[in-house]
Amino acid sequence: MIEQTIIIRDVDPVLVFGVEDRILQRIEAAFPNAKITARGNQIRVKGSAADFSDINDIINQLIKLATRNKAISEQDANTLVNMRKSEQISEGRSDNQLGDDGIVRTHSGELVRAKTPNQKNIVEASMRSDIVFAIGPAGTGKTYTSVALAVRALKERSVKKIVLVRPAVEAGESLGFLPGGLKDKIDPYLRPLYDSLEEMIDADRLDFNLTKNVIEIAPLAYMRGRTLNNAFVILDEAQNATSMQMKMFLTRLGYNSRAIITGDVTQTDLPKIKESGLISIQKILKGIEGIEFVYLDQRDVVRHKLIREIISAYERHEEELAKIEENKKTARGVKPAGKK
């Protein structure tokens, strides 16, 4: 048993203790072998070294919340305690090394792995470079791998927040005619990002991080004018970003930030008069140190086994259409592109 003191600085101690010390009582109840007492701006903890480490971490998180928000609820304390307990469970399950292709563990203890060579290339490129483009067809695990890397960076505290971004492009249905308010209209575009996060982070921790903007999910248009420091940023479905939007997004990155941009150049929902920024950027940024492009194909598909066949069938169909169009131009006396 040890006895150590935590000193509260820069905030009103009452905010951390709670009314009639209820927040401290909630924390103490979660650690039955520890004794917590408060006096002035000091918290005295008597217990094991492990309990003190956990309680100290929770108190420091509460201080940060008080500094930002000037108010802490008992629910905040409950969430922090639950998060810390879930960390202990997760750490107990992850005593074994992740391995060369392991990225992070889900909240249930399952290991998220890079399952294909090109998914491994995304992982390796992200370790080398601050900006990585992962380009390939649907089902190749671009988004899932990228979110796993972001969650790992947050858990390792190499970044302070995750920002997940998607263009909200109208595909066959006008936003104005969709039911609900702005959030209701936009959420369907962002749902795939929530799905990935929900697998990797337990519900209490995810809700807490979303509430406190440690994890932020937003439409691309909301990025304008911002600078993102100490962040892992993902732009998903980037084929639906225009060239100007792509430039705007890339210039948001600030100090100690990294980005992964994912997309499928064959599935753009932009009007035909607008070129996808994901297409043009491959020429614009080619050869710049610190920026890498990883290309995935049907061999990287990790969804249903038929997805690979569907992608191949569409590629053959598009090639046939291109040949038919070229034959039509030849019949009209128009020279095919690239021929003299």
Image (tube, rainbow, N blue to C red):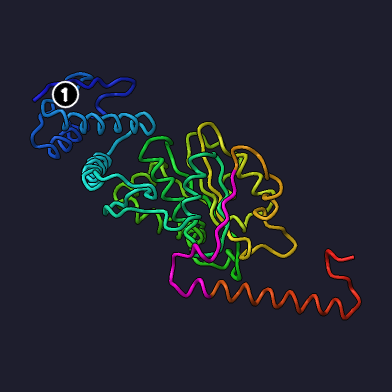
* 154 magenta-colored: no
The answer to which quarter of the image holds residue 170 is bottom right
**Neighbour tally class for label 1: few under 14, some 14-19, many 20 plus, Cα within 10 Å:** some
**Number of labelled discs?**
1
Residue type highlighted by circle 1: Ala
Q: If the image is split into quadrants, where does the C terminus sit?
A: bottom right
Q: Is residue 175 above or below residue 241?
A: below
**Rendered location of residue 240, percent (x, y):** 62, 58
In this rendering, would 16 be left or right of 288? left
The reply to whether residue 167 is in sight is: no
The span shown in magenta is: 292-309
Q: Nearer the viewer, residue 291 or 9?
A: 291
**Rendered location of residue 111, percent (x, y):** 32, 53
In this rendering, would 285 be left or right of 217? right
* 300 magenta-colored: yes
The reply to whether residue 6 is in sight is: yes
Q: Is residue 181 above or below residue 243?
A: below
In this rendering, would 39 be left or right of 110? left
Q: Which residue corresponds to the image point at 16% horizontal and 32% vertical from the top-left?
A: 51
Q: Is residue 202 above or below residue 324?
A: above
Q: If the image is split into quadrants, where does the N terminus sit?
A: top left
Q: Which residue corresponds to the image point at 70% horizontal and 52% vertical from the top-left?
A: 280
**Please, what secondary structure does the residue beneath circle 1 have?**
strand
* Residue hosting label 1: 38
The answer to which quarter of the image holds residue 278 is bottom right
**Rendered location of residue 132, percent (x, y):** 56, 46
Q: Nearer the viewer, residue 197 or 334?
A: 334
**Rendered location of residue 156, percent (x, y):** 36, 37
